[in-house]
Image (spheres, rainbow, N blue to C red):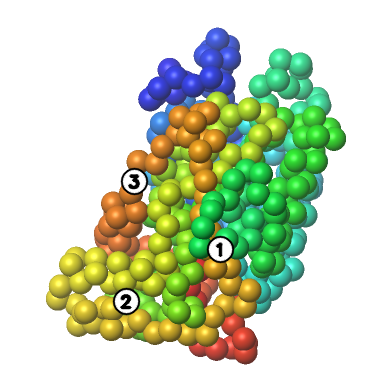
């Protein structure tokens, strides 16, 4: 069978043709991208082409589980490289593009917006044009099956107050260079659908966490700092709220949207697990106290330190995923408690990996702070 667990709509045409879908995943060596690639190889019969330029946050060690699999191949290509991207399309002839390649860390976007404009906007444009040129060359039945799935963020919507949720019709109001660049990319994708007819799908997700996340983000950074006995910096009062989504639940949602979603539509993906930043940090500390009772730094909550807030820090994000649940039947498997415990346990068991990926790439300094150069580790 094409899909090993369940039967979904778009797969039927490939079953009739007795061949596997070929999927081009951009950013497949990153956190979410690598989780998606592992899922596709493990749970489907798809052939997967991973296109990644291996920035500081991309690491092929995240793909050791699929390395050598005959249905997987890797192309080290920057999505801004027009000629190289066109070559990948011509050589691999994908049926689907799942576009995850992006610069994604808000604090880095404050220090250096240019990389975000280049990758997230120019790179998405380059990929869209390559996909459009390739798609128009296909036979009519292949054009009908082709999909360009663009993976985005809830941060494009801006900041919520204490009530309400982001929906697919919420007006865009990005606050950071990162979210503005992703909002721009979203608009480009929709424009290529409305102007040129390219069959697109757009998803906007809440904060991801889980295995193999680069340790600059809140959860893995807190774990690593606590284990080392370093201060656990929390922005402002710690009352900013995020909706947390376990990465494996996210990639299942992406697959669900790909095979069941309606062309031209947007689907919000959220874990319905709102937590304040300080609550997340305290929960991690309690888990570490439980899992490492002999730690010289326990109780780890004593390491928490409140620091100057991030410039333009959005107060609250919360995704309303009713459309995805109601139309496509997706549900998250992990609660925040179960997912976070799995995550903490994974990092405790993979300290060698953490040391390997951050060596010479990130020393824990605070990014996106004012004044520049403050040597306090950042939170996301």
Residue that carries the numbered disc 3 in the rendered image: 334
Residue at left offset 42%, top offset 69%:
277
- Residue closer to the observer: 54 or 249: 249
Rendering coords of residue 16 (x, y %) = 55, 10
In the visual, does 22 lie left or right of 141?
left
Closest to the camera, between mark 2 and mark 3, is 3
* C-alpha span from label 2 to label 1: 31 Å
In the visual, does 25 lie left or right of 141?
left
Closest to the camera, between mark 2 and mark 1, is 1
* Element class at badge 1: loop
Decide: few, some or many residues near mark 1? Use Cα within 10 Å; few <14, some 14-19, many ≥20.
few
Rendering coords of residue 352 (x, y %) = 33, 66
Asked where in the image residue 140 lies, by quadrant, the reply is: top right
Closer to the chain start, of discs 2 and 1, is: 1
The mark total stands at 3
- Residue closer to the observer: 215 or 208: 208
Q: Is residue 170 visible?
A: yes
* C-alpha span from label 1 to label 3: 26 Å
In the current view of this chain or complex, which residue is farthest to the left?
A: 294
């Amino acid at each position: 069978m094409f899909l090993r667990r369940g039967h979904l709509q778009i797969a039927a045409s490939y079953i009739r043709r007795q061949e596997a879908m070929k999927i081009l995943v951009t950013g497949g060596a990153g956190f979410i991208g690598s989780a998606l690639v592992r899922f596709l190889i493990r749970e489907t019969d798809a052939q997967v082409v991973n296109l990644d330029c291996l920035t500081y946050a991309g690491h092929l060690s995240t793909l050791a589980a699929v390395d050598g699999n005959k249905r997987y191949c890797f192309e080290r290509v920057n999505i801004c490289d027009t000629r190289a991207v066109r070559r990948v399309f011509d050589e691999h002839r994908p049926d689907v593009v799942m576009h995850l390649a992006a610069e994604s860390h808000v604090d880095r976007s404050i220090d250096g917006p240019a990389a975000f404009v280049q990758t997230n906007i120019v790179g998405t444009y380059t990929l869209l044009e390559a996909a459009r040129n390739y798609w128009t060359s296909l036979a009519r039945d292949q054009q009908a099956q082709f999909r360009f799935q663009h993976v985005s963020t809830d941060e494009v919507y801006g900041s919520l107050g204490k009530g309400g949720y982001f929906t697919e019709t919420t007006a865009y109001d990005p606050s950071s260079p990162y979210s503005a660049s992703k909002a721009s990319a979203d608009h480009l994708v929709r424009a290529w659908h409305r102007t040129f007819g390219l069959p697109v799908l757009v998803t906007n997700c809440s904060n991801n966490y889980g295995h193999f996340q680069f340790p600059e983000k809140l959860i893995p950074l807190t774990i690593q700092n606590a284990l080392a006995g370093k201060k656990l910096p929390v922005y402002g009062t710690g009352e900013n709220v995020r909706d947390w989504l376990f990465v494996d639940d996210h990639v299942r949602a992406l697959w669900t949207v790909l095979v069941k979603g309606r062309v031209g539509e947007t689907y919000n993906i959220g874990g319905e697990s709102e937590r304040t930043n300080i609550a997340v940090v305290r929960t991690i500390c309690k888990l570490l106290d439980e899992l490492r009772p002999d730690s010289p730094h326990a109780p780890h909550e004593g390491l928490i330190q409140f620091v100057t807030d991030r410039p333009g820090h959005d107060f609250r994000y919360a995704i309303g995923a009713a459309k995805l649940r109601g139309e496509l039947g997706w549900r998250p498997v992990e609660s925040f408690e179960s997912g976070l415990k799995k995550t903490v346990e994974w990092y405790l068991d993979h300290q060698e990996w953490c040391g390997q990926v951050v060596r010479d790439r990130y020393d824990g300094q605070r990014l996106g702070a004012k004044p520049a150069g403050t040597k306090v580790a950042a939170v996301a």
